[in-house]
Amino acid sequence: MTVSRQKYLQPSALCDFDCSHEIREKALVLAAGCRNRQARFDRIFAFVKELPYGLEDWDLKASEILQKGWGMCSGKTNLLVAMLRSVGIPARYRIYRIEADMGLWGELGKETGTAGRINDLGEERDHVDCEVWLGKWIACDPGRDTAMEQGMLKLGGTLERRKVTDTQGKVKYLRLSVFDQWVRERQGRRAFRSDRVDVFALINRGFEKLRESGRSA
């Protein structure tokens, strides 16, 4: 392990596998019997990916996501990074802008009566996923669970992340070993504030109906 990758194995206040024994214990259980790093990654990634996606605050600890059993892109990615680092697999955060699937969000707005509030989110949004070191840096996105993806496809949506590009057609990625400061600043800029818990609850019910549709597909 080179010195340059050591920083991708360290805990932080939000990536708290040093304080939460449950994170490493779960990672070890998932990785049991795996013969190599790729197999360990595959098991851990599959576990985190299948946790249900839902809207929540940005600045949650990895241990909080594991305890709750669901999360947003930032929370699920943070848990994935924490679990991988806890078993010696370097991982880092990758942040970039995406174009929202306005068709999907429009359907959710009609279903949950939150159309006006969903418009507050805008057509471009921040997205957080992960890069893992497996001989080279490999990008992986644990954000959406499979049932949600199947529901999206049933509605005629697409699973591709439409990344925002600059005037030269390039995606601007921010890669971080520690994302605590970025995510707390992002929490301070969130569109939903005083009533966010109620709005999130309504939208997340819509996500659950989407998952139910996906399971029956």
Image: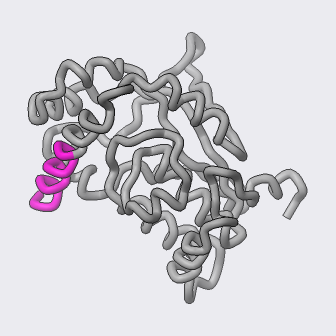
Q: Where residue 197 sits in the image (x, y, percent)?
A: 31, 38
Dominant secondary structure, magenta: helix
Question: Relative to residue 4, is residue 112 depicted above or below?
Answer: above
As drawn, the residue found furthest toward the bottom would be: 33
Furthest residue to the right? 3
Question: Residue reaching furthest top?
Answer: 167
Residue pictured at 14% horizontal, 40% vertical? 155
Identify which residue, 168 or 208, lies in the foreground.
208
The N terminus - image quarter = bottom right
| Residue 125 found in image quarter | top left
Is-magenta flag for residue 181? no
What coloring was used for the rendering?
one colour
Task: Say which residue appears at 43% left-offset and 66% top-offset.
Answer: 46
Asked if residue 211 shows in the view, the reply is: yes
Q: Residue at x 47, y 53 (%)?
A: 76
Q: Position of residue 127 (x, y in %)?
A: 48, 35
**Quadrant in the picture for residue 110:** top left
In the displayed structure image, the side of residue 67 where residue 199 appears, left or right: left
Q: Nearer the viewer, residue 140 or 207?
A: 207
Q: In which quadrant of the rendered image does the C terminus lie?
A: bottom left
* Magenta stretch bounds: 205-217
Vertical side of 122 occupied by 86: above or below: below
Q: Residue at x 80, y 53 (%)?
A: 7
Q: Is residue 57 above or below residue 169?
A: below
Q: Is residue 177 above or below residue 217?
A: above
- Tell me if residue 153 can be seen: no
Give the x, y percent position of residue 148.
25, 51
Drawn side of residue 141 relative to residue 116, left or right: right
Percent x, y of residue 213: 11, 53
